[in-house]
Amino acid sequence: MEIKAIGKVRHNGEDYNSGDVISGLTEKEYARLIQLKSGEAVEQLSNERIGSLQENNDFSGFQLNGPVVVSVEDFSGLKADEQKAHLKALKIEPAGKEEERIAQYEEWYAEQVSAGGND
């Protein structure tokens, strides 16, 4: 289970800032953090949102094992929790800072383009 930190949260020895997504929570941990008002439910990247992003890039209709490829520019425009959800869908552990998440996606994206993933 996942929550989005509302303020600074320390969980399992790791620090999270407001807006960071804390994943891998048990139901008990999730409920406790929600009850303490330390976090809120995470809005997953919806199929509708993916579809609207997909329409505006060169990879329209292209999927790689399920996750939709969006341009780096579109990825940069996503909310923090959407960026993290997208990286997780690509089997990439998302970084805490936005710049680092964008760099992670940029690297993955470049690998896909150089591998001919947009045929």
Image (cartoon, rainbow, N blue to C red):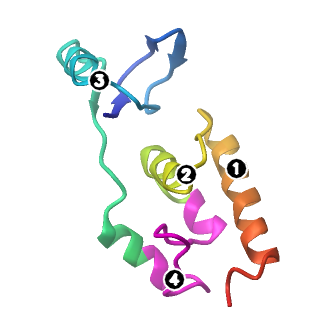
- Estimate the spatial distance between the alpha carbons at disc 4 and disc 2, rounded to whole Å: 19 Å
| Label 2 residue SS | helix
Percent x, y of residue 100: 69, 41
Residues at marks 3 and 4, CA–CA distance in whole angstroms: 37 Å
Mark found first going from the N terminus, 4 or 2: 4
Instruction: Please give left or right for residue 80 compared with residue 1 in the image.
Output: right
Q: In this rendering, which labeled residue sits more in front, label 2 or label 3? A: 3
Specify which label sits upstream in the sequence, 2 or 3: 3
**SS type, badge 1:** helix
Indicate the secondary structure of the residue bearing disc 3: loop
Residue designated by label 3: 26
In which quadrant is the C terminus drawn?
bottom right
Q: Which of marks 3 and 4 is nearer the N terminus?
A: 3
Disc with the residue nearer the chain's start (1 vs 4): 4
Say which amino acid is labelled 4: Asn
Report the amino acid beneath label 3: Thr
Which residue lies under the disc numbered 1?
A: 104
Three-letter code for the amino acid on which mark 1 is drawn: Gln
Label 4 belongs to which residue?
Answer: 56
**Residue 91 shown left or right of residue 39 in the figure:** right
Residue 29 vs residue 7, the one in the foreground: 29
Pinpoint residue 105: horizontal percent, then vertical percent: 66, 56
Query: Magenta segment, which residues?
Result: 53-76
Residue in the image at 17% along x and 16% along y: 35
